[in-house]
Amino acid sequence: MAETFTPGKVKQKVVVLAAHPKGMVKESDMRVEEQEIDLAVKEGSGDVVVKVLDISLDPYYRELMEEEDSVFGLPMFKIGQPLCGGLVGKVVLSANPEFSVGDFVFGHGNFSDYTIFPKAQGLRKVDPSVPLSYYLGVCGMPGLTAWAGLKLLGKPKAGEQVYVTAAAGAVGQIVGQLAKAYGCRVVGSAGSDEKVKLLKSEFGFDDAFNYKTEKDWNSALTKYFPNGIDIYFDNVGGRMLDEVLNHINTDARIPLCGAASQYNVDKSEWHGLRNAFNLIGKRAHMYGFMVAQFNSHAGEFFEEVSGLIKEGKIKVKEDVTEGLHNLPAAFVGLMKGANVGKAVVRVSN
Amino acid sequence: MAETFTPGKVKQKVVVLAAHPKGMVKESDMRVEEQEIDLAVKEGSGDVVVKVLDISLDPYYRELMEEEDSVFGLPMFKIGQPLCGGLVGKVVLSANPEFSVGDFVFGHGNFSDYTIFPKAQGLRKVDPSVPLSYYLGVCGMPGLTAWAGLKLLGKPKAGEQVYVTAAAGAVGQIVGQLAKAYGCRVVGSAGSDEKVKLLKSEFGFDDAFNYKTEKDWNSALTKYFPNGIDIYFDNVGGRMLDEVLNHINTDARIPLCGAASQYNVDKSEWHGLRNAFNLIGKRAHMYGFMVAQFNSHAGEFFEEVSGLIKEGKIKVKEDVTEGLHNLPAAFVGLMKGANVGKAVVRVSN
């Protein structure tokens, strides 16, 4: 990869927001444009130009496509402007003493072939001894989300009963494997038989079920949790969260990580939690959280999780889509649950 | 009160459950019976007979009147059997070395003129240097509920914005006064103008409103909390909790103490929380709790709260109904919000 790089104007692909989605996001809500960009950095500016290698696809992008402000408090995507999010890449130009050409980096930037990071904001170097895409998943934001939500909020104890939804997703698969490493019994649910099989055969879940074919969730939870649920790691919100509230044990903990079931639903159609009353009698806690609040734990997290990967206690499953032009389709696929494992778009090798 | 007491059969009043209430509880769901009781204790049994002085009326009794098991996990009231709950009284017969005739005690017992405590279970002596009825309120279960929910779960910091519902009730009035003692800004809501006035003039709330006349709760919360809500001490659940979820600040804490708005509503009509999604973006926590889990903190609680009473920082307001035969009406009144302050039935002086 010792290619040479010449500053100057280049044509590149950029993924922009074409329309605010109504309900389920469609490919046509995004658009892949060819744009000219002047790749140059001004001496002393601190700016860095990164060639994008892998882009992370995350469910929360869907919220940022809305017209009104998101509940997450993050900057919204704007019509005609690039989508942006987590990515890894290689520094090709640098006016910043902390970054050299050839460095591998992680940052939040535009979904395009090249991204300029003004003053290198939010950029950090990563160690290429693990696959770079791991910094988008198990060693990155989804991994920290899983680890912090389960360990710091859920406080699992050996022998406890753990339920995780969207269990084959980027966060869910790590939650389940961490819970097993902590000695819990883990059951996951996912949206296809293929994913269910993967959870049991590859990720070591004690059990798993397909929430699309097991339509009576109350019966399913009774069957899979005869001793109730101590920790529910919630990635989906809505009706499943509501059903779980009828199956929690005393002192249950519910880290609220996401509400995937509601992202593509109009706000007026959001499911109301009818069983929240149970939280009182069960002395149960619900913890909303955002991964950024745990950034100060990133070192501790990386040490533990990279160690578990090396020991083979955490296995990694990625769902890689080749080519930036396929990003819109891959994102719609993620929203429909078509991916198996962490969704990544490979822009360049 | 140095009356003499003779063991033997006596006629006494007993309040029993007559019917499982449908919707709002009615006086006829309870019945005051005259029953004969043999007041005697067997040597070595450990039993204690208590003459009941004051009975505590608490909203959670309503849940225990239901036909199906309560979400609280407590023994349910049964048709034809006595209601029971918190009371203070005086020991009149004792076969227990830890209790002497004349001791003032607190316990959970039947709502009758006399109550037998087998093996003195749950009975404890109280110091009559404060009014005995305080052990039913500010120095008892409602006080511990307020203190533990606000201090141990809500973790208030000076300058934070605190909202409490049912603010003139036994728990709410203490929550508000404690929050003021901790340097917070406190707004309460209650169901009558008289109560609202009391909150501001007597209990030192920064502001208060009547939730029955301020019908647009969203606007009310915007008006009374221009800087959002850091702690919501929830005594009512339902739609108000849902509205509050649109007004919480980052890192808000919501101790869930009760759901008075739902007690007299059929389960099928329970309000679903549509805004629980906001918990994620606001990194907010909801803490269900039951006061019994904090019993080990009772000493610390009593020291702090009795100190604040002596300093005049906590004022006590009771709503006393005279006579056991008036208990059913007083309980219906409590459920309809007619009481101002801690509801007590005075059985005997």
Image (cartoon, coloured by chain):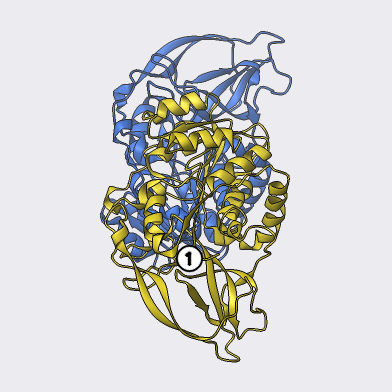
Chain colours: A blue, B yellow
Q: Amino acid at mark 1?
A: Gly
Total number of numbered labels?
A: 1
**Circle 1 marks a residue in which chain?**
B
Please identify the quarter of the rendering in which residue B327 is found. bottom left
User: Is any part of residue A139 visible from this angle?
Assistant: no
Residue A326 coordinates in the image, percent (x, y): 36, 28
Q: Which residue is mark 1?
A: B85
Residue B83 position (above or below residue A122): below
Front in this rendered view, residue B20 or A50: B20
Residue B348 coordinates in the image, percent (x, y): 52, 66
Residue A257 coordinates in the image, percent (x, y): 48, 43
Quadrant in which the C terminus of chain B is drawn:
bottom right
Q: What element does badge 1 sit on?
A: strand
Picture residue at 57% right of the left edge, 55% below the top: B137
Residue B39 position (above or below residue A110): below
Residue A234 coordinates in the image, percent (x, y): 44, 47
Taking A248 as reference, is B68 left or right?
Answer: left
